[in-house]
């Protein structure tokens, strides 16, 4: 008895239509295509609801989103290429709203007067300039000066005089903010180290560096 050979055609994703919603797989696309071929609208709508239930199981994390049922029906329309005539519990989504170009975000192109302080310092100074003279404004200037001194020492390890910080405040403000005479900032301990963002400097006794050194010491004692 002679064996007959059957040729098997293999299909690859590069040879078929690209999926609009890959998270649901090609099987859901096939279901949607078969549903669209149904002539009776009531039956199409019934099958659409069943497909949405299948999509819910395949994409269970959608439950974490608000109004997730509405999102599933929107996904159904997207898979169908927005060419779907059914009775949906939600209005059909508009492609322009989904694929439309996002609004441009305006950028602040105004040069920063002092980069080592940043643009936020300028905004704070602008706010202080609008405050009336008094104890509140003086307290705001003092708090700002302390913060600016900290930012200064992050990038400049040398000590900085209070007068330098005060001059920077008046310069950045364009003369709108005057530091009260006789104002002094609290002294900084020589043990304090201001680390730059993203750098793990200044380990204390509770830091990882201390723990690692203790582990090495204990290991050496155990080997002796």
Image (spheres, grey):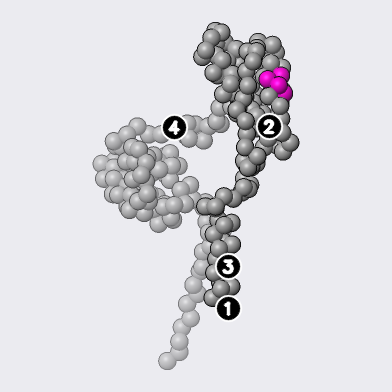
Q: Nearer the viewer, mark 2 or mark 4?
A: 2
Q: Is residue 27 above or below residue 172?
A: below
N-terminal of the pair, mark 2 or mark 3, is 2
Q: Give the Cα distance between marks 2 and 3.
A: 38 Å
The image's mark for residue 217 is 3
Q: Is 67 one of the magenta-colored residues?
A: no
In this rendering, which labeled residue sits more in front, label 2 or label 3? Answer: 3
Q: Compared to 138, does 82 lie above or below?
A: below
Dominant secondary structure of the residues highlighted in magenta in the image: helix
Q: Residues within 10 Å of mark 1 (few under 14, many from 20)?
A: few
| Numbered badge on residue 224 | 1
Quadrant hosting residue 109: top right
Q: Tell me the number on the disc at residue 152.
A: 2
Question: Which quarter of the picture shows residue 89?
Answer: top left
- From mark 3 to mark 4, how far is it between C-alphas? 67 Å
Q: Earlier in the sequence, mark 2 or mark 4?
A: 4
Residue range corresponding to the magenta coloring: 163-167
Q: Are marks 1 and 3 in contact (CB under 8 Å)?
A: no
Percent position (x, y) of residue 188? Answer: 62, 34
Q: Secondary structure at mark 1?
A: loop
């Amino acid at each position: 008895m002679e064996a007959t050979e059957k040729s098997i055609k293999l299909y690859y994703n590069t040879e078929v239509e690209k999926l609009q919603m890959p998270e649901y797989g090609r099987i859901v696309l096939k279901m949607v295509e078969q549903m669209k071929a149904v002539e009776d609208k009531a039956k199409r709508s019934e099958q659409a609801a069943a497909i949405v239930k299948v999509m819910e199981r395949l994409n269970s994390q959608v439950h974490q989103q608000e109004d997730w049922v509405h999102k599933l029906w929107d996904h159904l329309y997207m898979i169908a290429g927005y060419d779907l005539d059914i009775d949906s519990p939600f209005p059909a989504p508009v492609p322009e709203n989904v694929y439309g170009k996002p609004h441009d975000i305006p950028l602040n192109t105004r040069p920063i007067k002092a980069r080592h302080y940043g643009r936020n310092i300028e905004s704070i100074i602008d706010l202080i300039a609008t405050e009336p003279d008094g104890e509140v404004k003086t307290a705001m200037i003092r708090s700002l000066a302390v913060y600016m001194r900290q930012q200064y020492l992050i990038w400049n390890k040398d000590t900085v005089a209070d007068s330098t910080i005060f001059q920077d405040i008046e310069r950045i403000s364009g003369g709108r903010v005057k530091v009260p005479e006789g104002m002094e900032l609290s002294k900084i301990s020589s043990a304090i180290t201001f680390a730059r963002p993203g750098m793990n400097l200044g380990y204390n006794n509770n830091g990882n560096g201390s723990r690692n050194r203790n582990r090495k010491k204990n290991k050496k004692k155990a080997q002796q």
